[in-house]
Structures are given as structure tokens and as C-alpha cells.
Image (tube, coloured by chain):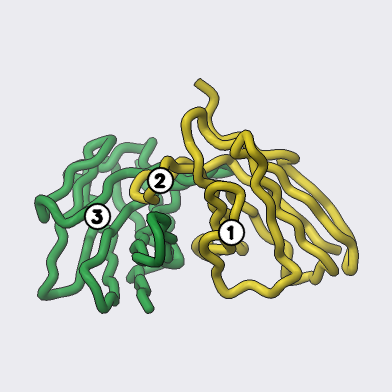
Amino acid sequence: AQSVTQLGSHVSVSEGALVLLRCNYSSSVPPYLFWYVQYPNQGLQLLLKYTSAATLVKGINGFEAEFKKSETSFHLTKPSAHMSDAAEYFCAVSSISSGSARQLTFGSGTQLTVLP
Amino acid sequence: DAGVTQSPTHLIKTRGQQVTLRCSPKSGHDTVSWYQQALGQGPQFIFQYYEEEERQRGNFPDRFSGHQFPNYSSELNVNALLLGDSALYLCASSFGTVEKLFFGSGTQLSVL
């Protein structure tokens, strides 16, 4: 079974400050890892994904994440927070199963607040 | 190009009733997955449909069932509703593998 733990259900940063959202995973096989963002009353939007290529993954809106196998981590960062980054962020791991289909296991989410 | 569309956006039911939620995948996508997102939690996988068959199922009771039509659209049915079924139900579509899921805005179900 695979699982994801997001440390910190709420994170507050000042506008222009570094954003760091933490995610640790558990997987018995090489994982595929994802970060999604959810704005109020909307579905989830993919920010970035790791699929066993480069360990440093760049995504949309200036976000990036680094896969660290030794630490089983996939933390999300952004050098300078913007007010529009305020949202809920979810880390997810994919579960390889029979056939070509896979399913995602999500963490419980981190609510990011950006202070002016 | 329309993305993933879900209907209705909001729904109120009472305990014991049955509900049907609908999802139209993004154009060109053939796989539909359903997720339940309870308040303050991450989405939980319910099941996935491909070629009109349920291919994967999460840890949900048989009260949750689904269907995929030849045009790839999908329905999620929940029977004998419980208060605990109140949640945001998200549909996601993809082509083949799940590395790039596109999510709809969801259906907010309230069970009273």
C-alpha cells in the first residue's frame, strides 16, 4: 500500500517569502508523485509531477519540487509567494495496478495563506 | 475545448435516498475516475472506468456504483445515502494512464 503524509495542515507566509510545503511518501515500489492545487469551489489542478526522470521537477506558476529517495520526500517550493498562491495544496502518489490504469492516493492537504 | 464537466454542482438529499452524479470527460479522454473529498480532507479514490468497465476500486461499499457510456461519459450512483456520504465528489479524466488527470469542479452532495 502507498501513502502520503503532508506535514502542516496550515502554512502562512508573507508575500514575497519562500513557500515550502512538505510531503513524505511511503511506497514499496518506485512511486510517481504529484502536487495538485485546489482553489475554493474548484477542482484540482496539476502543478507538477515526478515520474522517475529528473529529481528536480519544475511546474506551473513558479513551483518546483525535489524527489529525495533517501528521505522519502517530495517537498514543494516557490522562491517568492504571491497573493494568488493562496489555496489548498495536495501531494499525491500513484499506485501501479493491473492494466494501464493507476489510482492516486492523496495527502490530507495543506492550506497556504499568503499575508500582505 | 471543454474540460471535465460535472452535474449537478450542488445536491441535497435525505438519508436513505439514492443519488446519481454525472461526468463528461475532457475531449479525447477515455478513462474516468471518481473521488470523494470530505470536508478538510484529501480526495479518496472510489473507482475508475475504462472501456465501459470498472477497472479499479477503492475502499468503498457496494452502495457506490458506476457506469461508463460508449461516449466515455460516466455516472456515479450512491444508494441508501448516509450522513457520512456528504462530500465533494470529483470526477477526473485521463487518456490511458493516470499521470495527467484533469479534474472537474465537483458535485457538492449534502445528506440531511
Residue depth check, mark 2 versus mark 3: number of the one nearer the observer:
2
Give residue A62's quadrant in the image: top left
Q: Is residue B49 above or below residue A6?
A: above
Q: Return the x and y of residue A69 as percentages of the image width and height.
A: 13, 70
Chain identifier for the green-coloured part of the image: A
Chain bearing mark 1? B
Q: Is residue B29 above or below residue B91?
A: above
- Give the total number of marks visible in the rendering: 3
Chain identifier for the yellow-coloured part of the image: B
Task: Name the residue carrying label 3.
Answer: A76
Task: Name the residue carrying label 2.
Answer: B96
Q: Tell me which residue sits at (53%, 50%) in the image.
A: B50
The CA distance from mark 2 to mark 1 is 14 Å
Task: Name the residue carrying label 1.
Answer: B54
- Residue type highlighted by circle 1: Glu
Q: Are marks 2 and 3 on the same chain?
A: no
Task: Look at the numbered disc 3 and give the secondary structure of its residue.
Answer: strand
Q: Tell me which residue sits at (39%, 51%) in the image.
A: B98
Q: Earlier in the sequence, mark 2 or mark 1?
A: 1
Q: Return the x and y of residue A63 as percentages of the image width and height.
A: 23, 43
Q: Return the x and y of residue B101 as percentages of the image width and height.
A: 42, 45
Q: Residues within 10 Å of mark 1 (few under 14, many from 20)?
A: some
Task: Look at the numbered disc 1 and give the secondary structure of its residue.
Answer: strand
- Residue type highlighted by circle 3: Leu
Q: Return the x and y of residue A64 as percentages of the image width and height.
A: 19, 47
The CA distance from mark 2 to mark 3 is 27 Å
